[in-house]
Amino acid sequence: MLDEDMNITTSETDIYRMLLKNSCTLSNDLLELQQIEYEQCIILAEIDRIDVEKQRLKYLLNLLQSTKSNGRKKSQKHQLKRINSNPKSD
């Protein structure tokens, strides 16, 4: 009878160890998933920040291009005025 009790105890201990191991594995898996979700949030926030910066740079580029374009037009007008006001004498 003692052997049967020992077997039950050993069997229960084995089950307990298995459950504990599975619980630890699940806990580690959950922690890993939480870490992955946290890193995804950081990456998404960085993507959003980069997108905002990209839009800002596009705006500045367009502004610069329009300024250069306006500058060329003014420069061409200024050159035409100079040419028209100072005719060459032959």
Image (cartoon, grey):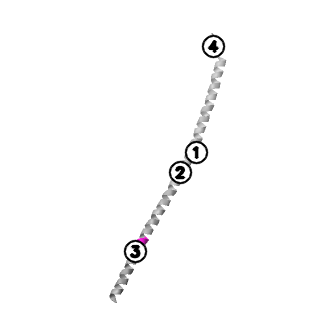
Give the image location of residue 13, x and y in percent: 37, 79
Residue projecting furthest to the top? 90
Position of the N terminus, as image quadrant, is bottom left
Residue projecting furthest to the bottom? 1
According to the picture, the residue beneath numbered tag 3 turns out to be 18
Give the image location of residue 82, x and y in percent: 64, 20
Mark 4 or mark 3: whose residue is earlier in sequence = 3
Callout 4 amino acid = Lys
Q: Residue at x 57, y 48 (%)?
A: 52
Q: CA distance from mark 2 to mark 3?
A: 43 Å
Mark 4 or mark 2: whose residue is earlier in sequence = 2
Q: Residue at x 59, y 36 (%)?
A: 64
- In the image, the segment drawn in magenta is 16-23
Callout 2 amino acid = Ile
Q: CA distance from mark 4 to mark 2?
A: 60 Å
According to the picture, the residue beneath numbered tag 2 turns out to be 47
